[in-house]
Amino acid sequence: MRSLSVFKQSTDRTSKWILTVGLFIGVMAAILAVIAPEPLRQLDRISYDFMLQRLGGKPHNPKVLIVDIDEASLARYGQWPWPRHLVARLLGIVRDGTPDSVGIDILFAEPDRSSLMFVNRDLKTEFGTELDISSMPPERVDHDWALSSTLNRGSFYLGVMFRFGEKNQTQVELPDSRLVVTHLSRDGEGIHPFPVADGVVAALPQLAVSADGSGFVNAAPDTDGVIRRVPLFIQYGNTLYPSLALATYMRSQKSKNMVIQSDKGGLVSIKAGETLIPVDKQGFVGLRFRGPSGTYPHISASDVLDGTISKDAFYGKIVFVGSSAEGLKDLHATLFDRRLSGVEVHATMVGAILDHDFISTPAWTSGAQGIGVLLSVLLSLTIVLWFSTWATALTLLGFLFIVPLSSAMLLKSHHVFISPVSTMAVCILSFALLAITRFRSEELRVLHRERQLAAARDCAIVGLASLAETRDAETGNHILRTQKYVQAMARHLVHHKSLDYRLQPKEVDLLFKSSPLHDVGKVGVPDSILLKPGPLTLPEFEAMKKHTLYGAEALARAESVSGISDDTSFLKTAREIALTHHEKWDGTGYPHGVKGKDIPLSGRLMALADVYDALISERVYKKAMSHEAVADIIRNSRGTHFDPEIVDVFEALEDEFWVISQKHADQKNRH
């Protein structure tokens, strides 16, 4: 017999169901791809992090350097905030090393209260006295003046912090960014989808005008708190302001020209000098972090102030001054480190610009993901409709291997990230749903076929039984009545206390279907004996006994030809009944004289049902007996003719036996 895989060549009806489900999955997958719910985005981020971690870290760009106000510096020169004259001295040393540019990741939003001018004012207010500071140099009197003087003589950019979602903030004027920004749109009017700030924490005007410019220090973590991309511009008022990293880089290139390119879908790229930076449609650029904290060289601020660092260390470098101290709370999570300082994020950004090393997510990646989702649905449909089981497993595993591998190779070679998550998820989900649909459809088809076979089997049983019945017209509805008696007793045994007698519901049905064949062997008995109106002679009775053997042999041959040989076969049960329904509990029955529980339970049940019906029905050679008389005979035959337990069952069902005998009685036996 050919084995049929559940995945091979569907029926037309099954195929229609699978195609309908596949179309539904495709539509839902397209909607999900467009909506991109947060759980799906989080899976995208996980796959992104995993791939970047497998690619490993990357050497830092040697042109970028960090001056770190670290824990050692705070221990050496006091806790933050430092007096501005100390910061001015630090920056002066850096400036004297002739760096290309310096970005300061420090907010100088309030005046330095440690300046003598503020101390003198407090003395006058509190104690009515003051110091004579009129002859002192301005940098001694006003520390902010000292810092502004230093800023004025170097290539410094100050950090600002934009605020969002606070509509009632007092608007603070910011100096112009000093960059020339040109906006080019491929489809006409320019689009400005950059984040829009409501407020800002900026440096004192005195300091802001002294520096070359300013840039924001805002980080932009994803919803899971991890930084994977950074904004390059933020809109405040009607002006676009660059990030501190971008502004510092532009100063190092001695360039002020920037070009923003967009199309109808949003931003495409930002050209900083001669470097083209790919951005997403919100203007964010994906960063490939080089590694954990400390990947970029850190010079301790205390070493700079103590003079242990040569000024040549800063020559021609892009320097960022900031802090990695935990107390200043400027630490961020990345895929390599949960505590990366903000100043190192700026350094990473500038290093990426110098190395032309960005992670790009172009607008067309959404279309690529959509095509991947569509292909996954089509593949699942093809697999479920046409492939064999082994081909299904190999194709599915191959597809689930190729998709993430292709995504990783694209990320490694072209720095373009296309998430494999949606394609893989839709493939697995669509295959599962389509397979379930296929299994269910096949299950229903097989169930329908089984019902047809069961109906055909029942017809065959009735036909065989009717064939035997036509040989003896006197038996009338004997087959139907005995079938009902056996069914009633079998149902009662479903709840029997003894396991030897307890039946399962499916066994009840098996007995009901098989019992009509108990006398099928009578077709082999000569008419002269079978239809004799009087008592049989001893030789005739011996010939009549053989109907049990004829029936068992015929059913055994049918069982052999059909190939059905399991213990739950209705032919096996029918053969048992045909052979043993005239055996007696005490061993005096025929054809083999077996006794007790060696007689199959089916035969013991049929023995009682057959005798009851034979006694309560009229025959040409005898009158019908009353139910009470028959019941007494059965009770008196307990332990001799009948199994005592089966007699107990009969006693519990006497009324039901009587109702069956009258409902299906032959016309001449009706009372």
Image (tube, helix red, strand yellow):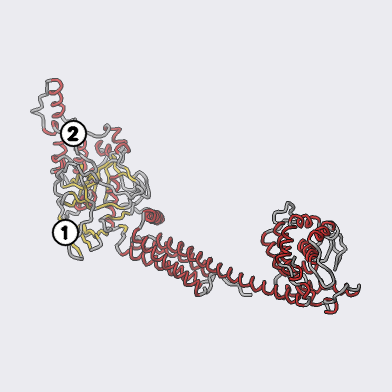
- Please tell me whether residue 392 is drawn above or below residue 146 in the rendered image: below
* Percent x, y of residue 134: 8, 28
**Residue 115 versus residue 195: which sits nearer the camera?**
195
Please tell me how crowded label 1 is: few (under 14), some (14-19), or many (20+) other residues with Cα within 10 Å. Answer: few
Q: Where, by quadrant of the figure, is residue 650 drawn?
A: bottom right
Mark 2, secondary structure of its residue:
loop
Q: Which mark is residue 343?
A: none
Point out the tag, 1 or 2, that comes first from the N-terminus: 2
Q: Amino acid at mark 1?
A: Thr
Residue in the image at 28% along x and 57% along y: 355
Q: Which residue is mark 2?
A: 112
Q: Which mark is residue 182?
A: 1
Q: Is residue 650 left or right of residue 244?
A: right
Q: Is residue 276 left or right of residue 580?
A: left
Could one spot residue 619 in this view of the protein?
yes
* Percent x, y of residue 593: 86, 65
Q: Is residue 83 left or right of residue 44?
A: left
Mark 1, secondary structure of its residue:
strand
Q: Amino acid at mark 2?
A: Asp
